[in-house]
Image (tube, rainbow, N blue to C red):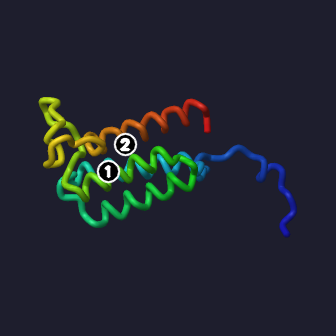
């Protein structure tokens, strides 16, 4: 074991190496879910790939494990909307009755925006709390 060299060991750093912190589990789960939803939108909500769906399932599971069950349920609602023909967003004129290809889109209407908004607000609240 090398003896302590106070001049070298306690000297200020030169900034060459950065200290990287591992994000807290809640923050990591929310960040991944936000990223997964963004990726899903960029790749096209109507033609979501199997990889996108798998990523959403994984993030929903991670959210559930951290206790964010509402966020997890909203991500699963997005998957449900993808699997059952739409209902991811209201139409441009605000008519939600035909979203998803069936009258009365109901709970499926606006699944993606609802999940996205919930995740963003949760992330902001978590950051405000300093967690």
On the question of residue 118 being in view, the answer is yes
The 10 Å Cα crowd at callout 1, few under 14, some 14 to 19, many 20 or more, is: many
Q: Which mark is residue 43?
A: none
Q: Residue at x 34, y 39 (%)?
A: 114
Q: Residue at x 27, y 45 (%)?
A: 108
Give the image quarter of residue 117.
top left
Q: Residue under circle 2?
A: 115
- CA distance for labels 1 and 2: 7 Å
On the question of residue 20 being in view, the answer is no
Q: Is residue 12 left or right of residue 19?
A: right
Above or below, comparing residue 129 to residue 17 in the picture: above
Q: Is residue 6 left or right of residue 84?
A: right
Q: Where does the image place residue 54, in percent across and percent down from the top left?
A: 36, 64
Q: Nearer the viewer, residue 7 or 43?
A: 43
Q: Earlier in the sequence, mark 1 or mark 2?
A: 1
Give the image quarter of residue 94.
top left
Which quarter of the rendering shows the C terminus?
top right
Q: Where does the image place residue 127, in percent across and percent down from the top left?
A: 54, 35
Which quarter of the rendering shows the N terminus?
bottom right
Q: Residue under circle 1?
A: 78
């Amino acid at each position: 074991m090398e003896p302590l060299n106070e001049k070298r060991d306690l000297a200020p750093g030169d900034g060459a190496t950065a200290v990287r912190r591992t994000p807290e589990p809640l923050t990591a789960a929310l960040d991944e879910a936000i990223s997964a939803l963004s990726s899903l939108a960029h790749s096209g909500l109507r033609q979501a790939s199997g990889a996108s769906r798998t990523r959403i399932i994984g993030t929903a599971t991670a959210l559930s494990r951290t206790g964010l069950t509402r966020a997890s349920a909203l991500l699963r609602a997005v998957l449900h909307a993808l699997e059952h023909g739409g209902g991811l967003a209201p139409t441009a004129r605000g008519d939600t009755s035909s979203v998803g290809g069936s009258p009365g889109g109901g709970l499926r209407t606006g699944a993606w925006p609802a999940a996205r908004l919930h995740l963003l607000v949760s992330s902001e609240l978590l950051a405000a709390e300093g967690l």
